Image (cartoon, rainbow, N blue to C red):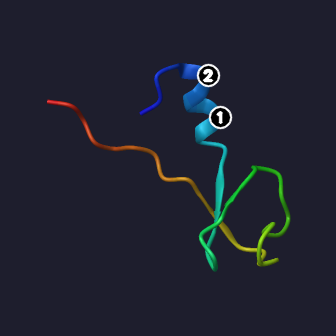
């Protein structure tokens, strides 16, 4: 998905808030926008180029 391996590693560290869908950095305890405390990891690209 990313052009460089370093960018791919940083891109996958993002956490998504389950309530407001905001992107948050990896080590947070609550969402920066709404204060919710439950996150999911950023989905990795599973599409393969033919």
Quadrant of the drawing holding the N terminus: top left
Residue sitting farthest toward the front: 33
Which residue is located at x 54 percent, y 21 percent?
5
The image shows residue 42 at horizontal and vertical percentages of 55, 53
Q: Which mark is residue 21?
A: none
Q: Secondary structure at mark 2?
A: helix
The image shows residue 20 at horizontal and vertical percentages of 63, 76
Which residue is located at x 66 percent, y 43 percent?
13
Near mark 1 (Cα within 10 A), the count class, few <14, some 14-19 or many ≥20, is few
Asked whether, in this view, residue 25 is left or right of residue 8, the answer is: right
Q: Quadrant of residue 47?
A: top left
Asked whether, in this view, residue 38 is left or right of residue 5, the answer is: right
Q: Separation of disc 2 and disc 1 at Cα?
A: 7 Å
Q: Are marks 2 and 1 in contact (CB under 8 Å)?
A: yes
Near mark 2 (Cα within 10 A), the count class, few <14, some 14-19 or many ≥20, is few
Quadrant of the drawing holding the C terminus: top left
For label 1, the residue is 10
Asked whether, in this view, residue 2 is left or right of residue 45, the answer is: right
For label 2, the residue is 6
Q: Quadrant of residue 45?
A: top left
Asked whether, in this view, residue 1 is left or right of residue 30, the answer is: left
Is 34 rendered above or below residue 45? below
Is 45 rendered above or below residue 38? above
Which residue is located at x 59 percent, y 42 percent?
12
The image shows residue 41 at horizontal and vertical percentages of 60, 56
Residue sitting farthest toward the left: 50
Q: Secondary structure at mark 1?
A: helix
What is the number of callouts on the image?
Answer: 2
Query: In front: 42, or 23?
Result: 23
The image shows residue 2 at horizontal and vertical percentages of 47, 29
């Amino acid at each position: 998905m990313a052009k460089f391996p370093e960018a791919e590693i940083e891109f996958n560290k993002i956490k998504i808030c389950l309530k407001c869908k905001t992107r948050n950095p990896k080590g947070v305890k609550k969402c920066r926008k709404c204060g919710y405390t439950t996150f999911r990891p950023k989905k990795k690209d599973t599409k393969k180029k033919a």
